[in-house]
Image (cartoon, helix red, strand yellow):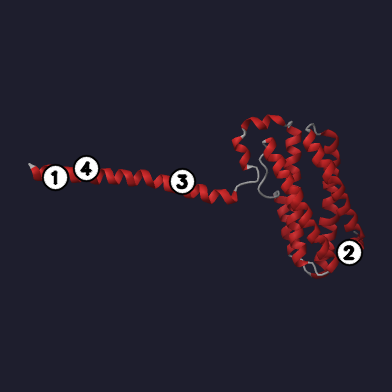
Amino acid sequence: MNKIAYVAAAALALALGAAQAQSAAPGAGSSMTGGQAAPAAQPGTGTRNMPDAKNKLARADRKFIENAAEGGMFEAQAGQLGASKASDAQVKSFASMLVDQHTAANNELVKLANAKGVELPAVPGHGMRRDIDKLGKRNGADFDEHFVREVGIKAHEKTIKMFEKAGKDVKDAELKAFIDKTLPSLRDHLAMAQKLPQAGKKGA
């Protein structure tokens, strides 16, 4: 009888041990998943803890923040490409300036979006990513010319129009202040691009 009881107790201990191992495994897995997800989280992920904040902005205001974030990411990423690939020193310097200033503006926009409960896109839209890929396939003077025309001039003209329209339409005071602060820099970028020698080539 004692032997039978001992065997039964051992079997029970093994069963409990297996159950503990199974319960620990999912926990470990979810912990790893959380750790892996954190660095890749979208800029606005932190706002999930503030569901009530989503009601602070009108839909048009939220849409502008999302579009501005995409445009800012495009300018910064294209600028990084220009800073590394441009063959002309002036274009390279212009590209580096775009990286610095658009990154700073993007960081400010992320803070504003988090405060307002707006989750931002993680990357620029498909069309913007495609434009960067196409630009990256060019080299030398051809790259410089297209960078100045497509990024320095056309992209900034489009962004300036979007900011000017939003400056008249947005309802949120803090968002309006961000627009008023950012617009002069965007206009400066456009003016600088238009003065580069590459701006007048190939009928630009």
**SS for callout 1:** helix
Q: Of the numbered discs in the image, which one, if any, rests on residue 12? A: 4
Q: Of the numbered discs in the image, which one, if any, rests on residue 33? A: none
Of pointers 3 and 2, the one earlier in the residue sequence? 3
Give the alpha-carbon distance from disc 1 to disc 2, as whole Å.
88 Å
**Whether label 1 touches label 2, CB < 8 Å:** no
- Disc 2 marks which residue? 198
Give the alpha-carbon distance from disc 3 to disc 1, as whole Å.
37 Å
**SS for callout 2:** helix
- Disc 3 marks which residue? 30
Crowd rating for badge 3 (residues with CA inside 10 Å; few <14, some 14–19, many 20+):
few
Q: What kind of residue is marked 1?
A: Tyr
Q: Residue 19 location in percent, x, y?
A: 31, 43
Q: Residue 177 location in percent, x, y?
A: 81, 39
Residue that lies at the very extreme toward the left in this rendered image: 1
Q: Residue at x 85, y 50 (%)?
A: 185
- Disc 1 marks which residue? 6
**SS for callout 3:** helix
Q: Front-most of 22 and 108?
A: 108
Q: What kind of residue is marked 3?
A: Ser
Q: What kind of residue is marked 4?
A: Leu
Q: Residue at x 67, y 36 (%)?
A: 117
Q: Residue at x 92, y 60 (%)?
A: 195
Of pointers 3 and 4, the one earlier in the residue sequence? 4
Give the alpha-carbon distance from disc 4 to disc 1, as whole Å.
10 Å
